[in-house]
Image (spheres, rainbow, N blue to C red):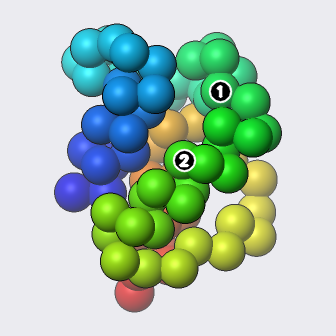
Amino acid sequence: MVYETIVKLLADRLDCDPSTIKPEDTFHDLGIDSLDTVDLLMNLEDELGISIELDEKVETVGDLAKFVESKKG
């Protein structure tokens, strides 16, 4: 569910088909900069109802999904 939510948010931001976003895609390759990442995390917090403190570097969509799932407990 976390991965699907991230992909949905990214697809909305990038105005693209969610199926084009893969777990191994880096945020840089997708054209997501640091400000976009902050916005994405805030939207993700709202969608999932959790607080996300990004305390490690995540570079890919899959990395972010794993990180958020680990924080959800």
Q: Position of residue 67 (x, y in %)?
A: 54, 63
Answer with left or right where residue 30 lies relative to residue 20: right
Going 44% across and 58% down the picture, which residue do you hit? 44
- Against 57, is 27 above or below? above
Amino acid of disc 2: Leu
Q: Tell me if label 1 and label 2 are in contact, CB under 8 Å.
A: yes
Would you name the residue on which mark 2 appears? 40
Q: Position of residue 57 (x, y in %)?
A: 76, 53
Going 68% across and 51% down the picture, which residue do you hit? 38
Amino acid of disc 1: Ile
Task: Say what secondary structure mark 1 lies in.
Answer: loop
Residue placed most toward the observer, 64 or 49: 49
- Against 45, is 43 above or below? above
Would you name the residue on which mark 1 appears? 32
Tell which residue pokes out farthest to the bottom in this image. 73
Going 26% across and 14% down the picture, which residue do you hit? 17
